[in-house]
Amino acid sequence: MKKLNWLEPLPLFDVAQTRRLEALATSRITSGPSLMAQAGLSVAKLAMAIKPCAPCYWIFCGPGNNGGDGLEAAAHLHQWGQQVRIVLWQPSAQRPSDAAQALSKVKALGISIQATLPAQGAVSRHDLCIDAMLGIGLRSSTCEPTKLEAEQALHSWIHSIYQCGADVLAVDTPSGLNTDTGQFQNMKVAPQAIQAQHTLQLLTAKPGCMTAHGRDACGTLWLDTLGSEDLQQNLKASAQINCRPQTQLRRQHASHKGSYGDVAVIGGETVQVRGMGMTGAADLAASAALHAGAGRVMVCYLANDRQSGTPSPRLAEIMQREFSALKLQSGVIVCGCGGGVTVRKVLPQVLQQSLQLVLDADALNAISQDPWLQELLRQRADQRRQTVITPHPLEAARLLKSDRASVQNDRLSAAQTLADDLKCTVVLKGSGTVIAKTGIGPVINFTGNARLATGGTGDVLAGLLGARMAQGLSEFQAACTAVFEHGLAADETDLPTLTAGKLATLIRGPQMASW
């Protein structure tokens, strides 16, 4: 068993793959404890590690295999001299054979079993609740009256587990969370109401626990593969975790500013265009590129053709350029940050001439409305030009001709669909940012926190990404590296509020060569 982090590569498997792995692992057991018994032991060990002095361990068990894991855990905790109470959903329900045997075991041990929720106040905040209700056995909603009534009662039970005041350890996943998507799609309660302090994933790590609502719902993530690592080699992972970059960029003594690439930021529509200026977005992207170690950083503010007196960059180290003076085929172009409607005038030229390109914000909105621009974007891959797009969920929905809810309901699929359609690397921002590219399985980022939920942090990511491409990383490598570093900067600060401007200064440039 191990606590999950972003220090090492980790494959993520969806529900179908996990069920196949479970069947393979079960079939090769000829003697000794069953897979369920092994899972129950793992749950019991983690429960004791989390709360070794808990007055009582309340174990809420559903009618499936997840409930069987909970029953096996109850037997171990009882045998270790702990106070255990089992709250059993549908005691008369037909259970899988291993779960039925586990129920017989706890009855023989005389462990307290009840079929109703604990009375108000019965659960102390010092106790530990174990959610073994559903696991990956998420059920789809139904309109049949009798089943609908049972489903509503089940939702009420799950809600009660998380509102009783004690810490919760979820087995495999908090009940109701779709482990493929990270959404509570069929729950009749707010996602914020279901948040475990710890989640023990069994057999496999699941993508839904690391993106969308999964990050909040699961709390601290743990994994016990139950000895199935060799079997996992025969399965294709549905995604990977984005781990710390293995290659560190380094500055050599015998180098100069031209050694670290050029980044040109095109955006920042000025206030004179529509009465609302967005030059700060371009400044933030340029600042991030500068602090990330790009050799030279330029900014091109977008203004009316007849306008004069455009603003100057906020940092003296950033050079200002007119669009006509930019060499689009040199360095990396970051286009769209605060670009407004004016960005549409330059996008055709940017798409056709730039060799390395990061598209963000209003550039993506413009492309979503123009089939010709979409085709120009697709053609870049055939011309071996590198492109990364960095949409947030609403921008992704516009590109997909969909809606934000549909994107969030399956973030991995949305990112991969965009990558396949537009033939570029996609960075779908949000909780558990997804990086996707055709031919490479989606990658989910594990760094970052809610401090990034402030205006301008996306511009900082775009500038950072541009710097990493300028420093020689491929578009996909640069995307994975930049997203990781962007989140890590937020994780490593103790500021209660993190502004985008401050975030840009926390970005680390290439390391100095040692001597």
Image (cartoon, helix red, strand yellow):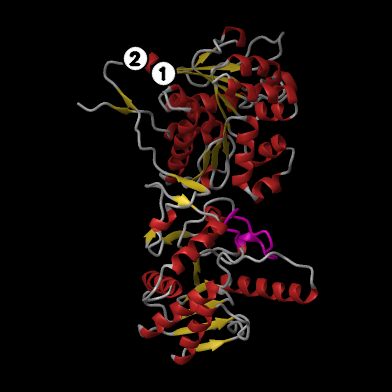
The reply to whether residue 201 is visible in this rendering is no
Residue displayed at 37% across by 77% down: 53
Q: Say whether residue 397 is left or right of residue 320.
A: right
Above or below: residue 363 compared with residue 345: below
Label 2 to label 1, Cα distance in Å?
Answer: 8 Å
Q: Is residue 407 above or below residue 254?
A: below
Question: Is disc 2 in contact with disc 1, using a CB cutoff of under 8 Å?
Answer: yes
Predominant secondary structure, magenta span: loop
Q: Does the stretch in magenta take in 173?
A: no
The residue lying at 45 percent from left, 84 percent from top is 84
Q: Quarter-wise, where is residue 336 in the image?
A: top right
| Label at residue 470 | none
Q: Nearer the viewer, residue 502 or 486?
A: 486
Magenta highlight on residue 187: yes
Compare marks 2 and 1 and give the one earlier in the sequence.
Answer: 2
Disc 1 element = loop
Q: Amino acid at mark 2?
A: His
Residue type at the position of mark 1: Gly
The answer to which of 253 and 44 lies nearer the viewer is 44
The residue beneath circle 2 is 256
| Magenta region, residue range | 177-192
- Residue labelled with disc 1: 295
